[in-house]
Structures are given as C-alpha cells and as structure tokens.
Image (cartoon, coloured by chain):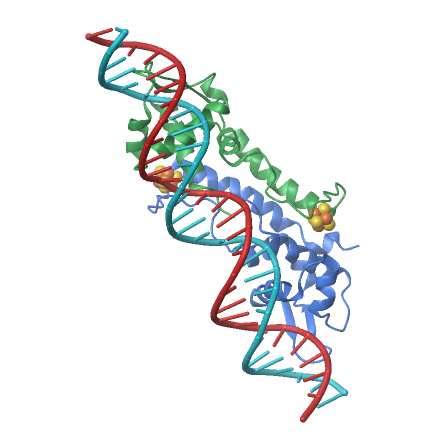
Chain colours: A green, B blue, C red, D cyan
DNA sequence: CAATTACGGACTTCGTGTGTCTATGATAAC
DNA sequence: GTTATCATAGACACACGAAGTCCGTAATTG
C-alpha cells in the first residue's frame, strides 16, 4: 500500500514542466538529470503521461515534451490516475455488492482523498 | 497501490466479532469458514490485531478471539493501521523536506482519507 | 494425560514495481 | 538525401512484498 516511485517522478516532472514552461519542448535527458533517474526509465513514465493527454511529445532534433492543453486545469489526481490507474484502492471478493456497508465506507474514504487531489492544481505550486 | 487482501479479511472479521459479540470467544476455524479462507492464514492476521490491542485471545479448549476494550471506539483506521502499518502512503527520495510543496499536498490528501476512516466506527455498521 | 486452540518461524509461489538494453520510427538540421 | 537527435516499444533481469502453506511449540481446559 504505497504510491509507486514512478508516480513521484511523474509529479516532479509535471511540476517542472509547468513551472519552467518554455516555448521549446524539453528533452528527457534534461528532465532525468534533475531527478537523478535514468532517462530510459523516465521516458516510459512520460509516455504514460502522453497517452493520458497531459503532455505532448515531439520527435527529432530540438524535440521533447511540453504540457498539453490548459495548464490551469491539470490536477494531482490527473497525474496519479495516469500512473496508478483509475481502479479503486479497495477490491474485494468478486461480487462487488453495491449495498455492502464495508464497501461503501472504503469507497467514500477514497473519494475524500481523490477530491482533495482533484481540487489542488499543479499551477498553484508553480511560483 | 492497493489495499491488501489481509486488510479486507481483518475488516470482515472485526465486523463479525462486533456484530455477533458472544460471551464465549470464537475460534479461528469458525471465522475462517465464514470468509472462505484458510484458518492458518487468518490466524496470522488475527495475531496482528491482538498485538494492536484490538482483540484479545485465549488459548486452550473453548478458546478463541474476542474484541478488547470499548467496542464503540474501534474505527476503520485502527484496523487498517494494524494491518498496513502507520507509515505514509507517499514516500519520496529520502530527504523528507518538510516544507516541500508536493509532499504537503500528498500528505494532506492522505490525511483527508484517514479522517474519514477514523470517524466511522465499526459499531455503526453492526445492526 | 489428552484434546483443543493460539502463536511463531520457515518456506514456497506469484505478481508487480523498477530498471536496463536494444531496436525502431519520426523529425530537424546539414 | 544523409546524419544526428529524440521519442517509442518490446524484451529482459531483478528485487521485494503479498498471499498462502506447513509444521512445531506453548498454553489452557477437561
Ligand atoms: S461483503 Fe462487501 S466488502 Fe466484503 S467482499 Fe463482499 S462486497 Fe467486498
Ligand atoms: S521534493 Fe518533496 S516530494 Fe520530491 S522527493 Fe523531495 S521531499 Fe519528496
């Protein structure tokens, strides 16, 4: 029951991309050096962010990654969902009874955390 | 990033122990049959609950497990902490800078979920 | 003593997270 | 067009923890 390190890398990368938003896209080499992680591994993480529609990529020389769409709308939850998936933290023995009491409590507790992560946008931390 | 199945078993067991609270302690055999899980495995889970002070055990014939202390005070969070540990879900690269912005957001989000789990007591679901 | 029950350690199995390596494809500069 | 740069994808290796199983020991009852 831990957040993956990949999620940690993704959060740092996204915050960096938003804070130092250049006109030129920034390559994975530079992003990897900032965090002391291998570029090939970070590229896999970035590909997930691309498929989630959070960043866009450009091949070739002077290529790299850039935030896609409105920066003000990107929340913590978007990034976490892109890395960890959208399935519930609490999965039980198959049946998935909707009216089960334990199920309801766990899901609403998870919902409380997700609401918090959804309401805090990355742009708020970029100063 | 999932809750362990052991946590699920622990929640069901505790709810059963509170709802059908008998004067006699109930053995692990009976508890295991209710959930379709091996008794030896469930006993390990129950030992964790004992060490957390949530239940008390009695050896010998007619022994078993019984809820310990006030049943009204036992919350979801108590059980989850006993199984999953009390460490934060979000652990980062060692330094643990307290004033880091990402860190603060993740911790407060986790706090929101824990508050929810702390405020819902097991006794509320036992009817 | 004998039966019952909890406790503990050692062990196996399996899935996933965390990386690395390498090949392929796309694009810009020359 | 050629070459250098950069992202993408798959295969692979490794470590670690979750999920159980098995068996021996201790404590209590009768
Ligand atoms: S009783 Fe509820 S929480 Fe338990 S396994 Fe069924 S649906 Fe899940
Ligand atoms: S910058 Fe903050 S979130 Fe990132 S590793 Fe350091 S303390 Fe953790």
Q: Is residue D15 left or right of residue A104?
A: left
Q: Eyeballing the image, is A87 above or below A103?
A: above
Q: Nearer the viewer, residue D16 or B25?
A: D16
Residue B19 in the image: above or below residue C10: above
Residue B17 appearing in the image: no
At 56% from the left and 42% from the top, the residue drawn is: B112
The answer to which of A68 and A113 lies nearer the viewer is A68
- Where is residue B94 drawn, in percent x and y? 34, 47
Residue name at image x 44 percent, y 27 percent: A47
Quarter of the view holding residue B61: bottom right
Q: Residue visible at 49% across and 24% down?
A: A51
Please state the horizontal and vertical placement of residue B86, each as a whole percent of the image: 50, 54
Q: Nearer the viewer, residue A73 or B120?
A: A73
Q: Is residue D14 left or right of residue A69?
A: left
Name the residue: 32% across, 23% down.
A27
Give residue B82's position: percent from left, percent from top: 56, 59
Q: Is residue A18 left or right of residue C3?
A: left
- Name the foreground residue: B122 vs A17: A17
Please indicate whether residue B104 sits to the left or right of residue B23 in the image. left
Above-or-below relation of A69 to A15: above
Can you say whether A115 is above or below A55 in the image?
below
């Amino acid at each position: 029951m831990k957040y993956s390190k990949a999620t940690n890398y993704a959060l740092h990368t996204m915050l960096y991309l938003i804070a130092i938003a250049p006109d030129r896209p920034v390559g994975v080499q530079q992003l990897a050096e900032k965090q002391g992680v291998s570029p090939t591994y970070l590229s896999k993480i970035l590909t997930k962010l691309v498929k989630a529609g959070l960043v866009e990529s450009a091949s070739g020389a002077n290529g790299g990654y850039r935030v896609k769409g409105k920066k003000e709308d990107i929340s913590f939850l978007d990034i976490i969902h892109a890395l960890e998936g959208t399935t519930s933290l609490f999965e039980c023995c198959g049946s998935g009874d909707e009216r089960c009491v334990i199920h309801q409590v766990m899901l609403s507790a998870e919902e409380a955390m997700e609401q918090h992560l959804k309401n805090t946008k990355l742009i708020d931390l970029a100063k």
